[in-house]
Image: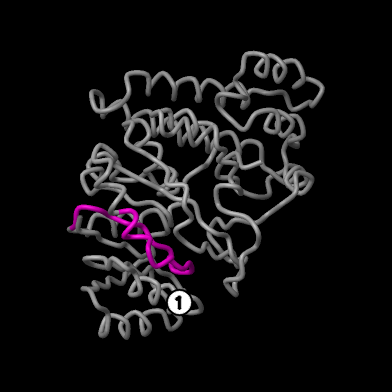
Amino acid sequence: MDISVVLCTYNGAHYLEKQLGSLSSQTRLPSELIICDDGSSDRTIEILKAFQAKAPFPVQIRVNPVRLGVTKNFEQAISLCSRELIALCDQDDCWLPEKLELVDEYFQQFPEVGAVFSDGIVVGADLIPLGYTLWQHVGFTVAEQLMMEKKAGMEVLLKHVAVTGATLVIKATLRLRVLPIPQEWMHDAWIALIASASEILRGMPAPLIQYRHHGANVVGAPRRSLLERLRETFRIDREFYYGSEIVRYRLARDRLESLSGLIREDALALVDEKLRHLEARAQLSDSRIGRIGPILKEFSASGYRRNSFGWQVAVKDFLLPSRKPSIEVQEDRI
């Protein structure tokens, strides 16, 4: 199958050449590379043009006159692709040489699949492994991997983040369902949720990239202890924490409703249950003592188990400060 690779860049000169080299070293070369730069001010464009001149495949470079941000930049890059498969690529990682070959073989073996993602080896800035993988970092367990194989991926993704965009490859036909991507979502989480609602998302357990964690990532994959994560809880803005999640899932529900007939029959019901869970948490008392009863009620009804990361999030809800805005939280990652 013909493969487009989409690479979004922004001031990525420090690591970019290594990533570009890993693309040209693939055992199965891409059919095209679509690059959308979001207004870099370092040597990124110079590096890209030098690679374009010698690349063993066509390279298209678009420089945004106005910054779009990560989500909208990936949306633009995906819309520009002309091949059957679209592989998402980050500027600071390194792909293992057989990545595209193995992905191509997977799609040929399972033609009903519309999107796949893989595990990745988490490395430091110097590409030395840090001792864990992406799936271990996000808690994507063997049991959840089996659920994904049995077309229950939506249940997994409504609980927690499991898909890293740098490992994601989709069929071009999926664009009609996922585009446009709401600004409120990260592009990878949105694509994965829509694909899982369509029962066409699968995971490939082999690590196919080196995911570079260097401290300046948009998301990153730091290994933090439970104590460190709980400490972070005390710096979270409760209203933003709950409110942004509710907004995102209302947007997801609207999109899924527009895809009626192309998604699981219970997809809307699953999102409604997620929204009910989030709204119940949003209504928790400012007083920690006053939260105990509602949290226990939600816990006993399995709301935390089905719609978030279990007891750890229940503890997080109890510890959240009353009102002390500080940091933004995209998802439940505790």
Q: Is residue 98 magenta?
A: yes
Residue 207 position in % (x across, y down):
48, 55
Is residue 263 toward the left or the right of residue 192 in the image? left
Quarter of the view holding residue 49: bottom left
Quarter of the view holding residue 280: top right
- In magenta, the rendered stretch is 83-103
Identify whether 151 is placed above or below 222. above
Give me the residue at 41% from left, 48% from top: 117
Q: What amino acid does circle 1 point to? A: Lys
Q: How crowded is mark 1: few (under 14 residues within 10 Å), some or many (20 or more)?
A: some
The residue closer to the viewer here, 212 or 37, is 212
Q: Which residue is situated farthest in the right direction here? A: 289
Label 1 sits on residue:
18
Residue 238 position in % (x across, y down):
66, 37
Location of the C terminus by quadrant is top right
Residue 124 position in % (x across, y down):
61, 68
Is residue 139 toward the left or the right of residue 224 in the image? left
Give me the residue at 22% from left, 49% from top: 172
Identify whether 317 is placed above or below 35. above
Give me the residue at 56% from left, 22% from top: 277
The residue closer to the viewer here, 86 or 245, is 86
